[in-house]
């Protein structure tokens, strides 16, 4: 399929609307344990025609995952990207950190089924992957599922609203 013809279902699109992949912005980040996989993921997503932003690191250096998780989470929370993809050794620390940013629903998905449900039930907006647990081909499959699975809404909407309410409640508490 030609690059311009890659069509995916946009998570925020109205039913029946299928914008081009390049209209979906994806922001990436990693630590040293996730760096090699993050590089492969960037190449894959660019090849597929997505608008990709890489927050780093740009080289294989020892860095702390919370620093990159926060960068990516902030971009997604601000609406600068539809999705974030974070890679550390396991995907756990990245998700834990990203979920501290209000508006972010990060899920560690090292398999396709988790990716499917994270999108259709939880409306997750940040995917965290384990660079030490997932090979590049599996990561591509996980990304394909993630990017093509819409949120189901319905009863799941009510539950996600409760997550959002907790974000707001606890954030407001801190500001008092
Ligand atoms: C780094 O060694 C490792 O702890 C980190 O990449 C990640 O797996 C943490 O969750």
Image: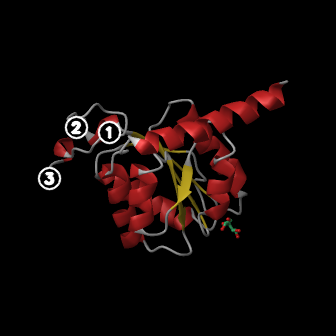
Query: Answer yes or no: do the residues labelled 1 and 3 have beta carbons within 8 Å?
Result: no
Q: Residue at x 70, y 49 (%)?
A: 67
Image mark for residue 10: 1
Judged left or right of residue 162, residue 23 is: left
Crowdedness near tag 1: few (<14), some (14–19) or many (≥20) residues, C-alpha within 10 Å: many
Taking depth in this image into account, of 36 and 114 the one nearest to the observer is 114
Is the CB–ligand 1 distance for label 3 below 8 Å? no
Kindly report the distance in space between the C-alpha atoms of the residues bearing marks 1 and 2: 6 Å
Which mark sits nearer the N-terminus, 3 or 2? 3
The image shows residue 134 at horizontal and vertical percentages of 48, 73
| Cβ atoms at labels 1 and 2 below 8 Å apart | yes
> Which circle, 1 or 3, is nearer the viewer?
1
Percent x, y of residue 49: 29, 46
- Asked whether mark 1 lies closer than 8 Å to ligand 1, one says no
Label 2 CB, ligand 1: below 8 Å? no
Q: At 71% across and 32% down in the image, what residue appears?
A: 169
Q: In terms of image quarters, where does ligand 1 lie? A: bottom right
The mark found on residue 1 in the picture is: 3
First reached walking from the N terminus: tag 1 or tag 2: 1
User: Can you see residue 26?
Assistant: no
Q: Earlier in the sequence, mark 1 or mark 3?
A: 3
Position of residue 164 measured from the top left corner of the image (x, y, whole percent): 59, 36
- Callout 1 secondary element: loop
Residue behind mark 2: 18
Say which quarter of the image contains residue 165.
top right
């Amino acid at each position: 399929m030609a690059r311009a013809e890659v069509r995916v279902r946009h998570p925020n699109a109205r039913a029946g609307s299928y914008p081009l992949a390049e209209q979906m912005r994806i922001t990436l980040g990693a630590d040293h344990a996730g760096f090699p996989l993050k590089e492969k993921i960037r190449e894959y997503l660019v090849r597929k025609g997505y608008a990709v932003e890489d927050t780093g690191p740009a080289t294989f250096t020892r860095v702390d995952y919370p620093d990159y998780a926060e960068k990516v989470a902030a971009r997604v929370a601000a609406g600068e990207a539809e999705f974030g993809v974070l890679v550390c050794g396991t995907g756990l620390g990245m998700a834990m950190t990203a979920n501290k940013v209000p508006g972010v629903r990060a899920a560690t998905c090292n398999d396709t089924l988790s990716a499917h449900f994270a999108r259709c039930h939880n409306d997750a907006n940040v995917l965290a992957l384990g660079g030490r647990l997932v090979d590049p081909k599996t990561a591509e499959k996980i990304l394909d599922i993630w990017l093509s699975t819409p949120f189901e809404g319905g009863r799941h909407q009510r539950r996600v609203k409760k997550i959002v309410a907790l974000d707001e409640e606890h954030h407001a508490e801190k500001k008092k």
